[in-house]
Amino acid sequence: MNIAIVGTGYVGLVTGTCFAETGANVICIDTNAAKIEALKKGVIPIYEPGLEEMVQRNVKAGRLTFGTSLEDCLDQVSIVFTAVGTPPNEDGSADLKYVLEVARTIGACMKRYVLVVTKSTVPVGTASKVKEVIRREQAARGVEIPFDVASNPEFLKEGNAINDFMTPDRVVVGVESDKARELMTKLYRPFLLNNFRVIFMDIPSAEMTKYAANSMLATRISFMNDIANLCELVGADVNMVRSGIGSDTRIGRKFLYPGCGYGGSCFPKDVKALIRTAEEHGYSMRVLKMVEAVNEDQKDILFRKLSAYYQGDLKGRTIALWGLAFKPETDDMREAPALVLIKKLQEAGCLIRAYDPAAMDEARRRIGDSIYYAKDMYDALLDADAMLMVTEWKEFRLPAWGVIRKTMKHPVIFDGRNIYDPHELAEAGLVYHCIGK
Ligand code: UDX
């Protein structure tokens, strides 16, 4: 089976590489020629465990190729996946210009049947816009070549993307023809060995599923952050409450961890976009508006705790930050709570020493030289008045508390991810604050 993936961002590259891994012939297309040249040499533009080796292996086997022109390969493929970006417009809606540009190229250049599958997260109704654009372009050429559109939203988690793709809980596919259903069944058949389900549905429902899933997960997080904040006020321990409610199978244990807010490329953008879609249809997503508001507040929580601890006297203090990426196992800093914290700390006149195992270059690119980039996690703590644990990387989990106590000026830890044991820190002579207890 020959397929093209347009857009070699996170989703496109993982999707293309994983399909190649199952034996499909995949060409990944991107307009960025420098990126494509690097990919041809097996150099990948993102940090994702296991991806580089998988790209190199499939390039070597000749199943994974890269190019800059969709037009040149359209005749050889039966499926085109659109995995281009849908950045948020100022009003929170998703900008579809790249998705529709791919549709335009397909309509203008196709010579035989092709199935056009949208992988990018797009608002309900996008597939019919894609169809309209392809039809319009064909009409301009005076041709009527059959094609189908489909929606196949992606549920990958950064840092675990290969695993999520190769052994998914489910694959959601929106189709409107038997031919499209057959092609998608064939493409996903290798994964059936792993016993998972392809859930076929109509296209608008598939488009909606992605937003509903991410919004539900974001809701769980904001809900738990609210519960955690209340736990502090009433003297309860959110970790206990979490295990108490998580053992109810209707609730489940996952995604109930309070912290310093959710970030990343999906939750914030998708929650905003769903609120916006509802508004366009004259409806207000009241719950989601609060989910977003709670999250914005939560990104400040470590700053508020620090400020309360020092009674507002923060000017000139040195603050260590452990973790900059929005979550572990990625260098992604999109909507990262660390960005909000850094801004707040700087406005209060603090000096920042930061360390992240993967996101140091990304941080430099985003915030420049206004903070000190530490050589390692202990260097970040030198003469610090407090340490803020922002991203729960594995290597931060069992630190040498004795060394930390001696390195810091004031050994105070604000744990934004609740990864440390309060008793252990107290024994080691450190002051410890966390979320929700
Ligand atoms: C998410 C979805 O999980 C994935 O299905 C979708 O396709 C894309 O968006 P991702 O953004 O990679 O994936 O990260 P995820 O692991 O889901 O975490 C998102 C954010 O929520 C992170 O900032 C994380 O720290 C936070 N989070 C997660 C919590 O605060 N508490 C939790 O219990 C879980």
Image (cartoon, helix red, strand yellow):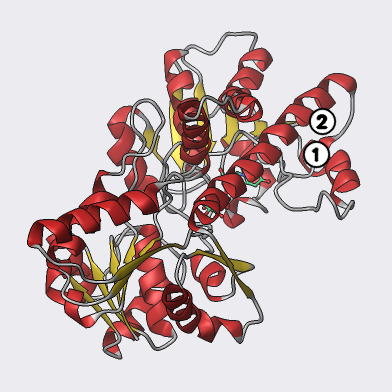
State which quarter of the image contains the N terminus: bottom left
- 19 or 417: which is nearer to us? 19
State which quarter of the image contains the C terminus: top right
- Please say whether residue 430 is visible from this viewpoint: no
Q: Secondary structure at mark 1?
A: helix
Kindly identify the residue that appears in the image at 50 percent across and 43 percent down.
326
Going by the picture, which residue comes out furthest to the left? Answer: 141
Residue 158 screen position, x and y as percent: 49, 57
Kindly identify the residue that appears in the image at 21 percent across and 74 percent down.
66
Residue 376 screen position, x and y as percent: 46, 49
Asked whether the beta carbons under mark 2 and mark 1 sit within 8 Å of each other, the answer is yes
**Relative to 379, residue 319 above or below:** above
Going by the picture, which residue comes out furthest to the top? Answer: 312
Residue 279 screen position, x and y as percent: 49, 26
Distance from the alpha carbon under mark 2 to that under mark 1: 10 Å
- Kindly identify which residue carries mark 2: 437
Residue 288 screen position, x and y as percent: 61, 30
- Kindly identify which residue carries mark 1: 422
Circle on res. 346: none
Q: Count neighbours of disc 2 (C-alpha within 10 A) and say few if under 14, some if 14 to 19, many if 20 or more.
A: some
